[in-house]
């Protein structure tokens, strides 16, 4: 029992942020994302002895994705949701030297808004792969396992997502600050 509990605590600590942030991206509703996160915690506990720790991330993210899709189907607004870029992504764009310059901060906020809008325009399958790869940091194999699609489809969807984002964002001219 102690080993099971330790294993569970390790998995929760390791993946709770991934589960919640992916749920936020997919559902665009904090309450639903919290519900999904709690349900995944319960599923992890119920299935703790059924999967290997090595394969846990893929199993957890696949379960999270599937549960998010279920929530979206229940709400019947699958194609009309949006999500926001969290502070973590905003911080990855900026660095310490820009934190004190209001002009640069404003520019970064505007850029983040443009990126957010562009990601929102992606079809669900491309958006899921893009978010899992670029924001959540999963590898092709993990995304393939999480979404239940072939690795080659993951690569193609990621390429298509990037191309669509380039098309949408090409009109956004980088200006000298």
Image (spheres, helix red, strand yellow):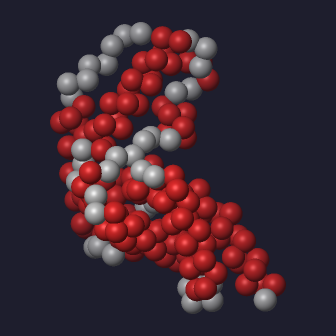
Q: Residue at x 43, y 71 (%)?
A: 67
**In the displayed structure, does residue 21 sit left or right of residue 118?**
right
**In the displayed structure, does residue 111 sit left or right of residue 171?**
right
| Percent x, y of residue 38 | 59, 68
Q: Which residue is drawn at 24% across and 55% down?
A: 79
Q: Which residue is drawn at 33% across and 13% down?
A: 175
Residue 103 seen? yes
| Percent x, y of residue 57 | 53, 70
Q: In which quarter of the image is residue 65?
A: bottom left
- Please say if 165 is above or below 151: above
| Percent x, y of residue 19 | 53, 62
**Residue closer to the observer: 159 or 22:** 22
- Please say if 154 is above or below 108: below
**Residue closer to the observer: 17 or 96:** 17
| Percent x, y of residue 100 | 61, 14
Q: In which quarter of the image is the N terminus?
A: bottom right
Q: Which residue lies furthest to the front in this view?
A: 75
- Please say if 165 is above or below 156: above
Q: In which quarter of the image is residue 27?
A: bottom left
Q: Residue at x 61, y 72 (%)?
A: 41
């Amino acid at each position: 029992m102690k080993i099971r509990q330790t294993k569970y605590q390790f998995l929760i600590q390791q993946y709770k942020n991934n589960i919640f942030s992916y749920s936020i991206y997919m559902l665009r509703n904090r309450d639903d994302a919290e519900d999904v996160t709690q349900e995944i915690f319960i599923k992890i506990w119920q299935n703790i002895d059924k999967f290997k720790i090595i394969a846990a991330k893929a199993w957890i993210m696949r379960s999270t994705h599937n549960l998010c899709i279920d929530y979206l189907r229940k709400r019947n607004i699958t194609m009309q949701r949006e999500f926001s870029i969290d502070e973590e992504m905003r911080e990855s764009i900026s660095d310490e030297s820009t934190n004190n310059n209001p002009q640069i901060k404003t520019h970064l906020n505007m850029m983040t808004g443009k990126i957010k809008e562009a990601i929102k325009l992606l079809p669900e399958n491309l958006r899921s792969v893009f978010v899992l790869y670029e924001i959540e940091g999963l590898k092709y194999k993990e995304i393939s396992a999480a979404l239940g699609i072939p690795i080659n489809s993951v690569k193609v969807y990621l390429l298509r997502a990037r191309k669509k984002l380039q098309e949408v964002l090409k009109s956004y001219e980088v200006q000298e600050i």
